[in-house]
Amino acid sequence: MPDGDVDFEDVEARLAAEALIVDVDGFEGPLDLLLTLSRTQKVDLRKISVLALAEQYLAFIHQAKSLRIELAADYLLMAAWLAFLKSRLLLPPDPSDDGPSGEELAAHLAFQLERLSAMRESAAKLMGRDQKGRDFFVRGVPEDVTRVRKVRYTATLLDLMQGYARIRTKDEFRPYAMDRAHVMTLEQALERMRGLIGFAGEWTDLLSWLPEGWETDPARRRSATASHFAASLELAKAGAIQIRQSDTFAPIQIRAMERG
Amino acid sequence: MAETDPQTPDGLESLFEAPPLAEQERMVEAILFATSETVTIAELNARMPHGSDGAQAIELLKKRYEGRGVCVVKVGDAFAMRTAPDLGFLMRKETVETRKLSRAAIETLAIIAYHQPVTRAEIEEIRGVSVSRGTVDQLLELEWIRFGRRRMTPGRPVTYVVTQDFLDHFGLESARDLPGVKELRAAGLLESRPPPGEPLPGEDEDHDENQAEMFEDED
Amino acid sequence: MAETDPQTPDGLESLFEAPPLAEQERMVEAILFATSETVTIAELNARMPHGSDGAQAIELLKKRYEGRGVCVVKVGDAFAMRTAPDLGFLMRKETVETRKLSRAAIETLAIIAYHQPVTRAEIEEIRGVSVSRGTVDQLLELEWIRFGRRRMTPGRPVTYVVTQDFLDHFGLESARDLPGVKELRAAGLLESRPPPGEPLPGEDEDHDENQAEMFEDED
């Protein structure tokens, strides 16, 4: 291993550097590498020698290059910047240069390292806290809050009146409260007669066909008579019965058609 | 808290000494809280430190939660913690949605109000269309209508009448207070036939507003 | 139990009277007990009967559960019931294996927690490397971080902040309770200090192009 121009002080440090290089993929960027290197100085980060650190870093890069290890561009950029910093720190300040001094740059780098280190420790402390699902637990059987959707229907009196008016307007001249109890429809009569017609072998008065309860009340009698008459015409047309009336206003008689 | 079990001697064995009963109670409390299934005494004992008496601890816990918002219940031969049954209503979040009554329902309701007691056949006769069971059921459910006496006619059809709730909702003292045909006409509500879905014409805004204010029931 | 509020007369108004405080405490107990998420005072009040004081009830409840196996914890501006951390060993059965976070994710999370609201560029500045999208996505997915307000600097970069879930997971009442946060602030380590010669963060000029390139990674 060519290590002629590597200025490591002892074998231990060199072995450490080799370990670093083997681990190069394990570093999370140049700042992380710098932080690791700074630990070898075994001093508080506030008292760190940035110059020494820069030299360590540059040596590391050199070593990696000699081992033909591909380093990401940001490591090389950091190396360039540290080389620049090193020259700033070593050379007397150029009065024509109004940029930041080497000391300012070094102080900032030290700050960054300290901050990163502090964040690492904080992250460790955070992860060391009691954690939900590991150290403390939530309710094992959480009860769902059931969402009850209640629909409330509303209507105003105006809605009601408008609704009623709408119906009334639809057929204003019709009786509003048609009393169905006193009306027999054609269909009702037809249905009734169809069922009974088989029993009418002889001529019988149509009025005798009116159902019970419809013969006395005049309104009901009228309605039932009319519907039964209409129904009998229907049945005659269908060939089910015969109809006869001997005289004007004489009783209308019906009988079932004899089947051949 | 730190009372020691008198039966257990000090020294090495105390390492395996059961925790104080109060501590066992805490443990049972935590286990019952966090476990999704019910827990038997045997399971409790298996999970608690050696020598613990889950049965005794659970009795203490049960007493502690008596009358609280949460209680220890026995399910079969296992235990669980549940919210107190009387507080179940807190686990419900009610959202009230206000909806306008459908046109069919309003018309049916109006007919019942104006013609009560009225049978379903009569309502259909007046509306000129059949009345769906759903519409009547909805009005019954709202408790705005109820069954009246059966009509003494063949088939003895049931009649409908409006309820006190109906009167309260519409701010009426009795169904007789409903505006009559004359008043409806005077209000411009009976004048002509509106196109379907449109408000009735002939209602000048002011009048309409007044009436709405007069009759609408903000509940 | 059934003590009446002296200020409220009998009759109708008592229907709307808040329940006695002891009863309110039971209610809060039931609600917190039943819920695995945190519940705010506003949510408590919304679910309890009208006139209830969730804040007062929760204080009582907190005291009642002091030293128990289950305790009432404050998370941000909300409350929850959790098992006592010292009893975690009993709950091995309940432990959920969480996905191991990478070192990058843990550091990123810590930086967001301690420096919030913080931009991606600032996180990268602190870590000295680019933050991969996957890392941020993972934290967003865990709902431990969320987007904060945009920074009012050129480019209006988005910021990240930690969530209520983060506080809940780590048993923190607020981000101010993060371990060592006071000391770090006092030491100036939570400042965003621009590199010397750089006028303002985010406004890169020619002379510090190098540095920007060094630390920032266009992903």
Image (cartoon, coloured by chain):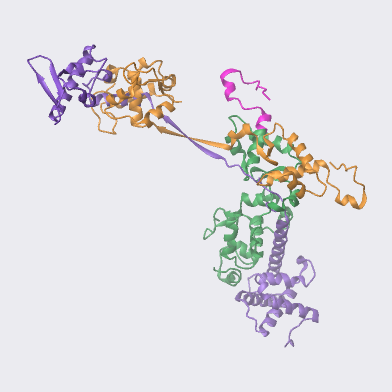
Chain colours: A purple, B orange, C green
Give the magenta part as a residue range: C1-25
| Residue sitting at x 76%, y 45% | B27
Residue C7 colored magenta? yes
Q: Quadrant of residue A100?
A: bottom right
Instruction: List x then y, in percent, for residue B23.
Output: 80, 43
Instruction: List x then y, in percent, for residue A190.
Output: 21, 26
Q: Quadrant of the C terminus of chain C?
A: bottom right
Q: Quadrant of residue A101?
A: bottom right
Q: Which residue is nearer to you in this view: A226 or A12? A: A226
**In this rendering, is residue B60 above or below B156?**
below
The reply to whether residue C69 is visible in this rendering is no
Left or right relative to A113: residue A203: left
**In this rendering, is residue A141 above or below A18?**
above
Q: Which residue is nearer to you in this view: B57 or B83? A: B57
Q: Which residue is nearer to you in this view: B160 or C135? A: B160
Q: Quadrant of the N terminus of chain C?
A: top right
The reply to whether residue B105 is visible in this rendering is yes
| Residue sitting at x 41%, y 29% | B138
- Which residue reaches farthest left? A247
How many numbered marks have been drawn onto this rendered protein structure? Answer: 0
